[in-house]
Image (cartoon, rainbow, N blue to C red):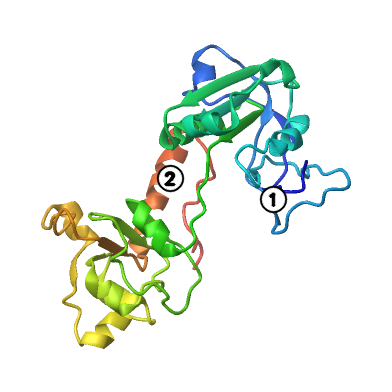
Amino acid sequence: MARGLSLVAGGAAPARVRPAKNCALAKAGVQSVPALAGTFGALRASESLPSQGNWSLPAPSFPTLSELFASHPRDGGWTGFLLPQTNTENPILWVQERMAVLESGRIHPPGLPSRNLIHVETRDARDALWAMEEGLRCAALSTVIGDVPIEVCASPEDVMAKAAVISFATTAVQPTIAGVSACRPGATVLHVSLRDLMPEAILQADNVVDDVDHVMRAQTSVHLAQQKVGNHDFVRCTLADILLGTQPARRDATSVAVFSPFGLGVLDLAVAKLAVRHARAKDRGVRIDGFFAGT
């Protein structure tokens, strides 16, 4: 069963918590139940699982995000691996995207270890991810299973040709992507890792940055483009310009927009302010009047 199965997983243990106030089960009146609480753990296996021996998810004292990839859409081995390890005392939310149903079929409840099942069938991957996120917020569930097809492309250019939004989040120190011409018209590239696009690709695009002077350093892709042409006129505007309404979000409807954010301390302060506001509203945390008392 596990011959063609690869695993990215962590483990979980039960704890008694209350469901989130705004989750669907809480609205239906579900009260405190044994459920999962905590944060993500991780165990990575880059090779396929061996076909011999008994395999199970590890069980540290926190819930887990687990990903199981079968060698073929019609291979149901992953379900046989996962289901015996679920907590059958609490409801299981199983979300299937329409294509997953067509490729592997609907679930067969009599064959499941528990009849305590909520099944959701969605029309597309976006709705499936939304349903899964709602389920993960609800502590009354023991397990959230998402059956969503994943397409593996042969090259970055294949991905760029198919996606309206492309996010680069790599550890690259030298650019490898020669251009953005493979992108769909009007695509948006989130160049988070800053060093994936060659200067030629940057010069083809509608460029937006968080801070012009800040990002033009440390051999980022836009820095290399500046060195190539001797100026940074290829940067149309900053994110602040767009948010303030002094510049449009896009140059035109067909250009490929590339956003290159180096990162600003003011964004960290904004997130911290949001966290403090929520903590005060929920009476959480410890207030410290100052770090320099007596000095």
Query: 213 and 108: which one is in front?
Result: 108
Q: Position of 37 compared to 245: left or right?
A: right
Secondary structure state at the residue bearing disc 2: helix
Q: Position of 192 compared to 117: left or right?
A: left
Q: Amino acid at mark 2?
A: Val
Secondary structure state at the residue bearing disc 1: strand
Residue 137 visible? The answer is no
Quarter of the image with the N terminus is top right
Which of labels 1 and 2 is toward the front? 1
Which residue is painted at 64% across and 40% down in the image? 38
Give x and y (percent) for residue 216.
30, 78
Give x and y (percent) for residue 115.
69, 15
Q: Amino acid at mark 1?
A: Ser
Judging by the rendered image, the residue that carries numbered circle 1 is 6
Judged from this view, the residue extending furthest toward the left is: 246
Quarter residue 278 falls in:
top left
Judging by the rendered image, the residue that carries numbered circle 2 is 276
Give x and y (percent) for residue 262.
36, 69
Judged from this view, the residue extending furthest toward the right is: 53
